[in-house]
Image (cartoon, rainbow, N blue to C red):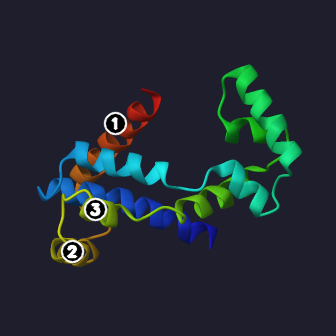
Amino acid sequence: MEKQGRQGAKSMALFGAHLVRRGVATASQIVEALARQNARRVPIDQLAITRGALTAADVLRVMDEARRTHDDFVRCSVKLGLLAPAAVADLLDAQRATGPRIGELLVEMGVLTHVTLLRELEEFQKAPAASGVHAVNVSIAIDHASTTTKRG
């Protein structure tokens, strides 16, 4: 299941690249949709408590460490030995499943219609797995822009 979740996330990143490549959405629209998606996901600390991976006291300890070291929650939880990398991967997969899908957000934003979304999903599923270097380059550009947006 863990592997399937990460493949699903990768597919959705490539779906964004597919939409850009086909001229249906711009990279900035995809980045905006990804930002909205992240904002509507269950925070990783809440998910860790709900799933029994961390206690509330553990979360406070990780938050103190993150504040002290200016590092993120996930890295600090691993550094403190509270979460194993495999547990982090499971939590991140579960977190990705909590937010709306990128296509739904693009419809909500008025970038796509439901009909266009369905057509593009069908085209995306027909396309070869990696559909060339261009898709990878667009995906990397989207990931980079998304990371830059989170910092700013």
Earlier sequence position, callout 1 versus callout 3:
3
How far apart are the alpha carbons under marks 1 and 3?
21 Å
Question: At label 3, which amino acid type do we have?
Answer: Glu
Earlier sequence position, callout 2 versus callout 1:
2
**Residue at (69% x, 57% y) in the render:** 47
Earlier sequence position, callout 2 versus callout 3:
3
**Mark in the foreground, 2 or 1:** 2
- Left or right of 66, for residue 2: left
**Residue 29 screen position, x and y as percent:** 24, 48
Number of the label disc, if any, that sits on residue 114: 2
**Residue 111 screen position, x and y as percent:** 18, 58
**Residue at (68% x, 42% y) in the render:** 74
**Residue at (62% x, 50% y) in the render:** 43
Q: Secondary structure at mark 2?
A: helix
Question: Quick check: marks 2 and 3 in contact, CB under 8 Å?
Answer: no
Question: What residue does disc 3 label?
Answer: 108
**Residue 123 screen position, x and y as percent:** 20, 74
Q: Visible in this render: residue 22? A: yes
Number of the label disc, if any, that sits on residue 35: none
Question: At label 2, which amino acid type do we have?
Answer: His
